Amino acid sequence: MPVSWTILIVLALSGLGYLATRSRAVRLAGGDIRKLHSRPSYYGWNAALLIGVPALFVTAIWRFLWPATSPALISAVALILAAAGLAFALTRTAPDFRARNAVETTVKALLMLCSSIAILTTAGIVLSMLFETGHFFQQYSWTEFFFGTTWSPRFGGGSDLGILPLLWGTLYISVIALAVSVPIGLFAAIYMSEYASGRMRSIAKPMIEVLAGIPTIVYGLFALITVGPMLRDWFAQPLGLGSSGSSVMTAGLVMGIMLIPFVSSLSDDIINAVPQSLRDGALGLGSTRSETIRKVVLPAALPGIVGAILLAASRAIGETMIVVMGAGAAAQMGLNPFEAMTTITVKIVSQLTGDTDFAAPETLVAFALGLTLFTITLGLNIVALYVVRKYREQYE
């Protein structure tokens, strides 16, 4: 029996169990639901949870851990658990049974399980990267990885896997992207929240947020076909700084455009959340609107704005497609923004593309690169948390 059929049967049994136990509870109370400890629906939900949760949980875990197991065996175990849950629910059904307490306890346990999934997933990601990074450093010197200035992987031996060129390209492109997105996004948020009329805001904000829904591959094509040649013809070649359309500036500008809605939309919501009483107090003391925004509204909203900028920075550091099509794949260090460079994420993809040997350092280096990105993002979170706590205390 296919597992999908098993799931449907278990759900059907849960529905039947709900109806059967609910009717049984009312019947045992002689038709007077006032004699029941809980409302009749709680008796039904108790049965539905006892039938469905164990069977579906065992099915999911079994399929995940042992996918080669016979579907018939999984179906048999799931149906046995469902039948046992139905029998147990029917025997527990009685007027004095605390069905509401049992249901709320079960639902609370399910909510705790769901909330722990994110934590367990993060722990699993970190542990997998740590283990594979450990295998990499057993085969390759950590000093050459962190302080090497040459990136030249060669499957078969003799690779130079210095991270500094990749790290430089990642930070260079991200800084340009933030230099574009943060001022534009923040000024747009200030205008929409403090100056724009309700009608203008209802039009402008959705139009800005449309940028967030455009696939990154479309931004990459825009960088490759439009922005790159324009920067080359208008700036790079006339100034003698380069002749390629793929450059750090191309990727940074297009990525900055992509990040504008991340900054503007979140900052707008945060600025609107500042109490109106703070604005009224500043205006009542004689401040102009611009002074109120600069000295009252923005400082009060600063913790949230820092969070929005952090989100944009994390998005910039992890971007791949725009860099591939806009900045090229040259792992080099330089200050010329019109030269081609690359980032850590691009090289992670390239090292794991095609037929790879996961015992070779040329492949395992992708996990070391991923762990480095994770550490950088963690550092950004720590800095943002410090800023949030420092400035939040002034307004509590």
Image: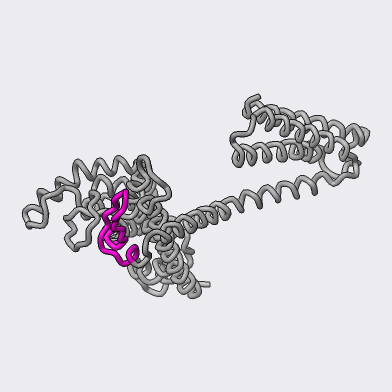
Residue 127 visible (yes or no): yes
Residue 272 visible (yes or no): no
Q: Quadrant of the N terminus?
A: top right
Q: Residue at x 35, y 67 (%)?
A: 143
Q: Is residue 213 magenta?
A: no
Q: Which of 23/198 is in front?
A: 23
Q: Which of 26/167 is in front?
A: 167
Q: Which of 240/129 is in front?
A: 129
Give the x, y percent position of residue 54. Answer: 72, 40
Vertical side of 346 occupied by 375: above or below: below
Q: Residue at x 22, y 61 (%)?
A: 333
Q: Which of 375/389 is in front?
A: 375
Give the x, y percent position of residue 288. Answer: 34, 69
Give the x, y percent position of residue 123. Answer: 54, 56
Name the residue at the top extreme.
1
Q: Residue at x 34, y 48 (%)?
A: 351
Q: Which residues are magenta?
A: 144-169
Residue 130 appears left or right of 289:
right
Residue 337 appears left or right of 366:
left
Q: Residue at x 37, y 72 (%)?
A: 295
Q: Is residue 167 magenta?
A: yes
Give the x, y percent position of residue 322. Answer: 29, 47
Give the mark count. Answer: 0
Q: How does the figure colour the protein chain or chains?
A: one colour
Q: Quadrant of residue 30?
A: top right
Residue 157 appears left or right of 29:
left
Residue 169 appears left or right of 377:
left
Q: Quadrant of residue 381?
A: bottom left
